[in-house]
């Protein structure tokens, strides 16, 4: 895979996990936790057996796909097969793939339970379980589902639990699901990666959109993720950015899985360079080339912040994170700083002049590239003729004006947002917050005509 040395979390976890002990592993975003649990999983897979031997549970579908891909890369030589099983994908197709005897399943809780109910997945031979982003699954209220899944797994199994954040209540989960876990924490003062520059701008809600555009103009990110608080805002933001001439697409839990897959693919290939997302894309996603993360809306809790900005600055790369915050939300920002033990640098709203400077810089770069290509012969005669009447500075300035993208002022309306202010856990059940994920629990339990539960479907939809 081209890795030259193990990252600290890998160096510390792999030997312990290889002995079969339970591991509770915490290390910053982008430091290779997937391989930290993936290498022991692959190593401890018995190729003589045709059974499913390991189960990885992830909070989102995209993460299930990505983790399965990474496990397949790690297991390539040994020929270990990992299969992602997630909601929104044709279940019959998954049933067919399950018949091909993968040794490892990577799944989201809801769909895993679907397969358990249909008896299309056998968990009786599993001896390794990984909870990736364990604290998020706890936060999303997946504990019951995970318990139900684990109850079908033989008592004798190893559990590996990983995340970049381990809030205190994760202990309860660890106590519930693990046996004397070895706790491995890579030593760092700050919870965030030092190579990510962290900035914030304090502004009024109504200034956010223009400011966002100006930042994009100045920074000209290679790939950027813009996080919005709700699905509706993500839709409006993506649409607004397109109106202003940026190539952006939104991703959130109300879109079809096919659409979500398309957005991720187009973002990875660089067909679009801005992905606007809810927290559905905050965890675990490893997309190279993400140079900037913008929190159009400040996240509700510090963990969410850590994971969101961790989509940049991965595997030793640098990154820039910018958070837009209104004055009434400044408390949330200070709380994030306190928990991450890292101060964000305050920036001011970019001025028109700064935007112009940024845009002109890009225009000059394009111009100089053309100069370097040395293919302007066909234009020389015209240029010389023009220079007879107009002085060179005026002429060049006019050409620059033509190729410079001046700030676009197309009117864009983003619905005012009154949602911020409380951490997720404290919010009331009517709050739309993170896609209504807290509207969960038994009250939503419904039965369809054929007796199958719709509950998971509804829950899953609202969560991821
Ligand atoms: N030993 C290594 N050397 C170099 N790169 C590595 C190494 N191990 C993993 N990577 C790469 O680093 C990137 C980040 O890894 P990974 O996604 O596992 O991070 P993570 O710790 O799980 O992050 P997050 O907390 O965001 O989920 C991946 O592209 C991975 O292939
Ligand atoms: Mg990860």
Image: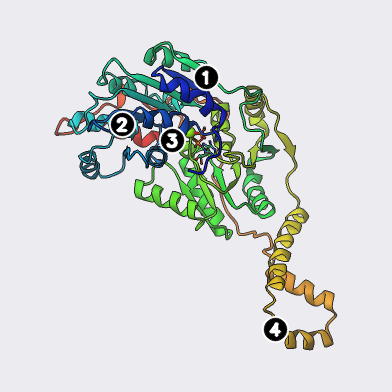
Decide: few, some or many residues near mark 3? Use Cα within 10 Å; few <14, some 14-19, many ≥20: many
For marks 1 and 2, the one nearer the N-term is 2
User: Circle 3 is placed at which residue position?
Assistant: 435
Say which element carries label 4: helix
The circle on residue 377 is 4
Q: Is residue 384 visible?
A: yes
Could you tell me if the residues under marks 1 and 4 are in contact, i.e. CB atoms within 8 Å?
no
The circle on residue 449 is none
Confirm if mark 2 falls within 8 A of ligand 2.
no
User: Circle 2 is placed at which residue position?
Assistant: 110
For marks 1 and 3, the one nearer the N-term is 1
The C terminus: image quadrant:
top left
Count every numbered label the image shows and give the total.
Answer: 4
Labels 1, 3: front one = 1
Q: Residue at x 62, y 42 (%)?
A: 317
Decide: few, some or many residues near mark 4? Use Cα within 10 Å; few <14, some 14-19, many ≥20: few
- How far, Cα to Cα, is label 1 from label 3? 33 Å
Q: Which residue is drawn at 22% across and 32% down?
A: 121
Q: In this view, does 323 lie above or below 44?
A: below
For marks 4 and 2, the one nearer the N-term is 2
Query: 307 or 46, which is in the foreground?
Result: 46
Q: Residue at x 69, y 68 (%)?
A: 369
User: Circle 1 is placed at which residue position?
Assistant: 184
Say which element carries label 3: loop
- How far, Cα to Cα, is label 2 from label 3? 17 Å
Query: 21 or 196, which is in the foreground?
Result: 21
């Amino acid at each position: 895979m081209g890795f030259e040395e193990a990252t600290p979390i890998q160096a510390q976890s792999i030997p312990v996990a290889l002995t079969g002990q339970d591991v509770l592993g915490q290390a910053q975003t982008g430091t290779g936790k997937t391989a930290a649990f993936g290498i022991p999983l692959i190593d401890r897979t018995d190729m003589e057996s045709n059974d499913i031997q390991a189960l990885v549970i992830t909070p989102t579908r995209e993460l299930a796909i990505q983790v399965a891909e990474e496990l397949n890369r790690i297991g390539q030589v040994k020929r270990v097969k990992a299969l992602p099983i997630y909601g929104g994908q044709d279940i019959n197709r998954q049933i067919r793939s399950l018949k091909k005897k993968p040794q490892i399943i990577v799944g989201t809780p809801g769909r895993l339970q679907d397969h358990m109910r249909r008896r299309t997945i056998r968990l009786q031979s599993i001896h390794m379980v990984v909870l990736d982003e364990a604290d998020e699954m706890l936060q999303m209220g997946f504990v019951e589902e995970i318990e139900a899944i684990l109850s079908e797994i033989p008592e004798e199994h190893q559990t590996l639990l990983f995340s970049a954040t381990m809030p205190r209540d994760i202990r309860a989960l660890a106590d519930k699901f693990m046996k004397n876990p070895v706790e491995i924490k890579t030593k760092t003062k700050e919870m965030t990666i030092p190579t990510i520059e962290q900035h914030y701008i304090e502004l009024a809600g109504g200034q956010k959109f223009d400011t966002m555009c100006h930042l994009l103009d100045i920074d000209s990110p290679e790939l950027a993720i813009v996080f919005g608080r709700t699905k509706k805002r993500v839709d409006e933001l993506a649409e607004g950015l397109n109106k202003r001439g940026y190539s952006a697409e939104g991703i959130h839990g109300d879109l079809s899985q096919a659409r979500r897959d398309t957005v991720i693919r187009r973002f990875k290939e660089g067909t679009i360079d801005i992905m606007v997302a809810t927290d559905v894309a905050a965890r675990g996603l490893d997309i190279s080339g993400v140079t900037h993360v913008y929190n159009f809306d400040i996240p509700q809790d510090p963990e969410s912040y850590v994971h969101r900005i961790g989509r940049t600055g991965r595997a030793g790369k640098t990154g820039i994170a910018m958070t837009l915050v209104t004055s009434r939300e400044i408390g949330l920002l200070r709380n994030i700083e306190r928990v991450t033990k890292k101060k964000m640098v305050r920036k001011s709203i970019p001025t028109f002049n700064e935007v112009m400077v940024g845009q002109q810089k890009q225009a000059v770069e394009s111009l100089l590239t053309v100069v370097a290509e040395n293919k302007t012969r066909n234009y020389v005669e015209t240029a010389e003729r023009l220079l007879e009447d107009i002085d060179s500075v005026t002429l060049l300035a006019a050409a620059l004006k033509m190729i410079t993208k001046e700030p676009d002022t197309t009117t864009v309306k983003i619905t005012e947002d009154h949602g911020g202010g409380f951490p997720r856990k404290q919010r009331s059940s009517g709050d739309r917050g993170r896609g209504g994920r807290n509207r969960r629990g038994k009250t939503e339990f419904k039965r369809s005509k054929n007796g199958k539960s719709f509950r998971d479907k509804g829950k899953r939809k609202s969560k991821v």
